[in-house]
Image (tube, rainbow, N blue to C red):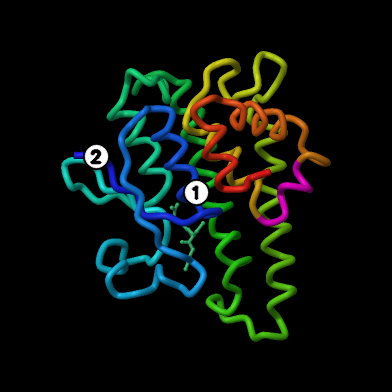
Amino acid sequence: MSYILYGDIGSGSAIAEMALAEIGAEVEHRAVPLEGDHQLRADYLAINPMGRLPTLVLPDGTVLTESLAILVSLADLHPEAALLPAPGDTARAVVLRWMALLAGEFYPQVTRWDYPARFGYAPDQAEAARDNALAMGRDVLRIIEDHAGLDDAGPFLLGTWFSVADIAIAVMCRWMKGREWVPAHLPRIQKLAEAVAARPAIAPVWARHRLG
Ligand SMILES: N[C@@H](CCC(=O)N[C@@H](CS)C(=O)NCC(=O)O)C(=O)O
């Protein structure tokens, strides 16, 4: 049995797809186009009641949602790929910190940017809401740029050790106009993103999702 990944081009499913590519796992892709809100249709809500992408079905049939849970689970299920330090290693705590920040503070701003009406903003408030989501999302990225220890030891969060956290940062920093803004303002994150994009297993996925 292979993994089943529900996703769409340009969506958060790119993150899970990249982790699976690093692992070299067999994946069946099932398209859920955000265009036309297919993620809110009853058949998909039966799998992911939040109506969000991605959803990953493990080979044993376990349904996983939430990108953070998907990434940590994939790393734990495939220790040979060394995509996270082992439990008990404080380096794991460090990368979990930054992944949790992205999941808890950055991703919700992307939702506000994409769907301001869902948050109660009237159409004439939507632009201001999106500007605010953009500013708050950029604040999170700036914190990672300045406090996550990205330095000359290597391009990744853990220096030369590539982890699933690097995938999350690299992809998410491209969203909300990040393709232009990050190269101009966040040199350490930009270097990380370029290093992630250049990895042989990830490069084709990066290109397919048009991450720039
Ligand atoms: N908490 C979820 C958030 C996923 C999410 O918001 N995905 C976006 C695509 S990048 C989505 O499905 N948006 C459609 C919607 O909210 O209706 C995760 O971490 O995976």
Vertical order, 86 against 50 (above or below): above
Write down the residue under mark 2.
Answer: 2
In the image, the residue with mark 1 has its CB under 8 Å from the nearest atom of ligand 1: yes
The reply, left or right, for residue 198 in relation to residue 69 is right
Name of the residue lying farthest toward the right: 184
Reply above or below: 6 against 82: below
User: Of the numbered discs in the image, which one, if any, rests on residue 125?
Assistant: none
* Label 1 to label 2: alpha-carbon separation: 26 Å
Using the image as rendered, state which of residue 12 and residue 209 is in the foreground. Answer: 209
Q: Residue at x 52, y 39 (%)?
A: 205
Whichever of callouts 1 and 2 sits on the residue coming sooner in the sequence is: 2
Secondary element at tag 2: loop
Q: Is residue 181 magenta?
A: yes
Q: Based on the displayed image, in which of its 4 quarters is residue 27 positioned?
A: top left
Pinpoint residue 46: horizontal percent, then vertical percent. Answer: 25, 67
Tell me what residue is drawn at x 68 percent, y 77 percent: 126
How crowded pointer 1 is (Cα within 10 Å; few <14, some 14-19, many 20+) is rated as: some
Q: Which residue is mark 1?
A: 103
Q: Is residue 140 magenta?
A: no
Q: Which residues are magenta?
A: 176-182
Residue in the picture at 25% in, 51% down: 63
Ligand 1 contact, mark 2 (Cβ < 8 Å)? no
At label 2, counting other C-alpha atoms closer than 10 Å, the crowd grade (few under 14, some 14-19, many 20 or more) is few
Amino acid of disc 1: Ala
- Type of residue at label 2? Ser
Residue at 67% from the left image edge and 56% from the top image edge: 176
